[in-house]
Amino acid sequence: MACHELGALRLGLMKIIGIENEAARIHDENEVGEALNNAGPIQSLAKADSLKDLQKFFDSSISDLEERVSKLSDDDKNLPYYRSLLILTKKVELELESHLKGVESFWKNLDEMHDYVHEIFPG
């Protein structure tokens, strides 16, 4: 289950930040499997064109995962494993949010630095 979410996130990140690693791409495509061919958050996540879309589609994929796990019976022998996957994806979600805030802060700081240069060197 969650391997789909993480593999698709890696594929989307590779596309957005320009990582060209054929072995990693093939590995993640194999990990995600048929979900790459099915319309939905996993496919959209793997094909995201922006960091904001990446975050939006990852959030959607986690919602789908949470829904699937919530439908498991309490006596399902795999329930602890799937709950662990939810914890993992939550951690990744928080990390992604933190990184995106950092990139946005960097973007804002560039403007502030640009203004500062013009204060020192008007013209």
Image (spheres, grey):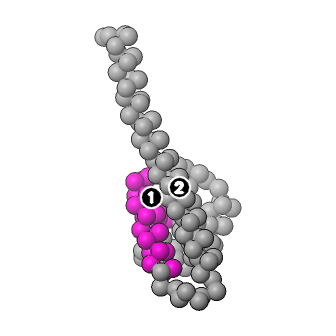
Name the side, left or right, on which 27 lies relative to 39: right
Quadrant of the drawing holding the N terminus: bottom right
Give the quadrant of the C terminus: top left
In the picture of the structure, the residue carrying the numbered disc 2 is 13
**Against 6, is 37 above or below?**
below
Q: Does residue 88 sit above or below 39 in this rendering?
A: above
Q: Which of 19 and 6 lies nearest the eye of the viewer?
A: 6
Q: Which residue is drawn at 66% across and 67% down?
A: 27
Q: Mark 1 points at which residue?
A: 54
- Specify few, some or many for label 2: CA neighbours under 10 Å numbering under 14, 14-19, or 20 or more: many
Q: Position of residue 102 (x, y in %)?
A: 47, 41
Q: In the rendered structure, which segment of residues is drawn in magenta?
A: 44-69
Q: Position of residue 40 (x, y in %)?
A: 42, 74
Name which of mark 2 and mark 1 comes first in the sequence.
2
User: How far across and how far down the image is residue 61, in percent?
Assistant: 46, 70
Does dot 2 land on a helix, a strand or a loop? Answer: helix
Say if residue 29 shows up in the picture. Answer: no
Q: Is residue 112 visible?
A: yes
Magenta region includes residue 47: yes
- Residue at position x 44%, y 75% from top? 64
Instruction: Judge left or right: residue 100 versus residue 77.
Output: left
Q: Residue at x 59, y 70 (%)?
A: 85
Residue 13 part of the magenta segment: no
Q: Nearer the viewer, residue 98 or 11?
A: 98
Q: How far apart are marks 2 and 1 (CA)?
A: 8 Å
Identify the amino acid type marked 1.
Answer: Leu
Marks 2 and 1: CB-CB under 8 Å?
Answer: yes
From this viewpoint, which residue is outermost toward the right? 23
Q: Main secondary structure of the magenta part?
A: helix
